[in-house]
Amino acid sequence: MRRGFIGSSSSLKSLTLATLLLFSSIIGSSYAQSLTDAQVRTVRQRLADVATRSWELGTRAQVLIEFDSAAYDVLSPSCKLPPNTTNPPSSLDTPFSIVRPVVDQSTSHAQSGNGSLMDDGSVADPASLGVTVLLANWTGAGNGADFGGAAQRELSYLLEKAPKTAEGAISHRMDKTQLWSDFIYMVPPFLAYYGALHENKTLMDEAFNQISLYRDKLHDGDSGNLWRHIVLGGDGEDAGRWSTGNGWAAMGMLRVLGTYKASSLSRDYGDKIGTLEGWVDEILHGMYDTVSNSNTALFNNYADQPKTFRDGSSTALIAAAAYRLAVLSDGGRVGTIPKAEKARRELSKHAGDAGGHIDGDGWLSPVVDPHNFPVQGSRSPEGQAFVVSMIAGYKAWNAAGQPGINAASSMRLVSMQEVLLAGLVTFAGWALVDLY
């Protein structure tokens, strides 16, 4: 009777084996869904291969500082401003080597140029190089390069020469007064960092002012608090909620927030820090709400337009922002950590294989064409940089004790525990069969 109730020994053995194999595969996959150090190096090399435009170079320098030099990265709680100038680490050599040719070129055209670090049609994009230029100057990495003069000319250009709206928002473009969400990553972090180095509250406040002015024009409360991409200026406007643009805005605000916290004047910026945390958090929640009922963690290129293609670039950048917000808010804003973890695992799964989002050569896919926003591209400098930023953020989040981990892991733990319990129950039945 017992044998008939429990089942045949051979069938139970098969069921037990299948159950335990399933559990083993779940456990194995949880470890496989992270990039190895070698894979990150390959991603970084591909980034070095293709970054040429001003914002690509600036973003590359920034994410390398994030990954390699936490004590000099404003997104890290260990960063203090002004930074230590005694024996700066060799890990800063590559970021400094990225901006040095730009500075040399800017210096040679100091008399004839407009003061911008690079003349590429954008007011804002060259400023993405500014933080690294300032850091190189502060740590004495000049060796003949006029980093300080280049930074001063860039600042003067932004504040005194660049087109502005009637309210005072600095234009993203040179040829027209036009506001892009990308601007938030490029200009406000430079203004805030410049101010923090020199304890200049006027500049630090201007960083927040620019963010606020841009948010007034781009924030869309009717679309889950996402930001429009481009407004004003007529030709080229894009009112869509471009996913990468929302990532640019979120990470730019985090860099200003981190600069305030790292500054010697941090006590004066409590209210602004709290406001920035809220503005970043609403973007992250708005973005992740668009994939809450999806079988993938990858965002659509335009977040609330499901017919647009899935995009790995913005997915990596938003995940990076979620990790950084969890840490910079001292664990106070961790609501999107579960979804960031899901995104990171999905982007990392099968990395190096033909079916993975990161192939054997280190290229991320699918990605938007960074020069043609509605179109899917093939190789994106931005996308490569955002993967590095995501992994740097993930490591910083781990080092901080994984704030929000309980929410992030609860569903996975429950599912694995259920499989384990089923395996143990079946194994007990198998033992009883053999006993009787």
Image: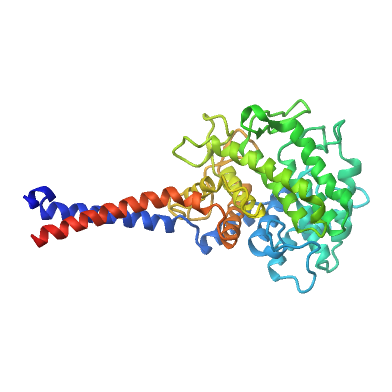
| Figure label count | 0
Q: Is residue 42 left or right of residue 295?
A: right
Q: What coloring was used for the rendering?
A: rainbow
Left or right: 341 as drawn, with respect to 32: right
Residue 186 vs residue 17, the one in the foreground: 17
Q: Nearer the viewer, residue 312 or 261?
A: 261
Q: Decide: is 182 above or below 42.
A: above
Q: Position of residue 38 (x, y in %)?
A: 52, 63
User: Residue at image x 82%, y 41%?
Assistant: 209
Extreme residue in the bottom direction: 87
Q: Quadrant of the C terminus?
A: bottom left
Which of the 4 image quarters holds residue 224? top right
In this view, which residue lies farthest toward the left?
1
Q: Nearer the viewer, residue 423 or 36?
A: 423
Q: Is residue 114 visible?
A: no
Relative to 133, is 222 on the left or the right? left
Residue at the spot x=8%, y=48% of the render?
4
Q: Is residue 221 above or below residue 51?
A: above
Position in image of residue 345 (x %, y %): 48, 51
Q: How far from the left and from the top, in percent, is residue 90? A: 70, 70
Pick the front one: 72 or 353: 72
- Single out the residue that lies furthest toward the front: 1
Residue 318, located in which quarter of the rendered image? top right
